Image: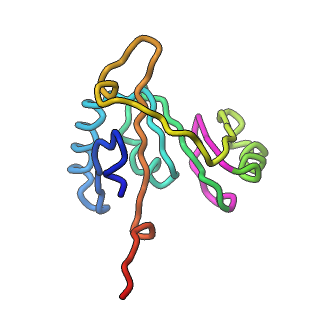
Amino acid sequence: MIISIPNFLERLNFNGISIVNFNTKLTRIIKSYKPDIVHFFDSTSYNLIRPFLSNNIKIVVNKCGGPNPKNFPKVDNLVLFSKENKEWFSKRNKYKATNIFLIPNRAGTIITSESSLHKKDLGTFNLMRIARIGKTYVKRKYK
């Protein structure tokens, strides 16, 4: 379960209607956590949250593989997990100014401590990840 992940701070649900309530909660989280970088795992969450973020925060967006998109937002920093996606984005004029990075869809465990979440030492940064976990990903129990 996602809430059992170390350093998980909060789940923020948005039902598509109460935008003011959503913005209030998101603003509280941003002010508390003070991220230097916000990392989105998909364009849907990016499109939803981007209007509420300060221009001072650096943004990284992932496209986690799959077919090349028909529509994808113009972003400054894009991380891709497939060579095919990297080739596709690199050939598009819309993404000429985008920093495009290809990394394998595997990484080692990042170990942090609770105290490091709100403490900023010189030469370090806070990273906040935002992902859209929809009903598609819920494990269903079948009888």
* Image side of residue 47 versus residue 9, left or right: right
Q: Position of residue 141 (x, y in %)?
A: 36, 79
Q: Where is residue 8 in the image (x, y as percent from the top left)?
A: 33, 43
Disc count in the image? 0
Residues shaded magenta: 67-81
* Image side of residue 76 versus residue 4, left or right: right
- 113, 99: nearer the viewer: 113
User: Which color scheme did the rendering employ for the protein?
Assistant: rainbow
Q: Is 70 drawn above or below residue 59 in the view shown?
A: below
- 92, 126: nearer the viewer: 126
Q: Which residue is drawn at 26% across and 30% down?
A: 31
* Image side of residue 27 versus residue 63, left or right: left
Which quadrant would residue 51 be assigned to in this image? top left
In the rendered image, which quarter contains the N terminus? bottom left
Q: Residue at x 29, y 51 (%)?
A: 12
Q: Position of residue 118 (x, y in %)?
A: 29, 25
| Residue farthest toward the top in the current orientation of the protein | 122
Q: Residue at x 45, y 19 (%)?
A: 124
- 99, 92: nearer the viewer: 99
Q: Where is residue 130 in the image (x, y as percent from the top left)?
A: 41, 46
Magenta stretch containing residue 74, yes or no? yes
Magenta stretch containing residue 72, yes or no? yes
What secondary structure characterizes most of the magenta part?
A: loop
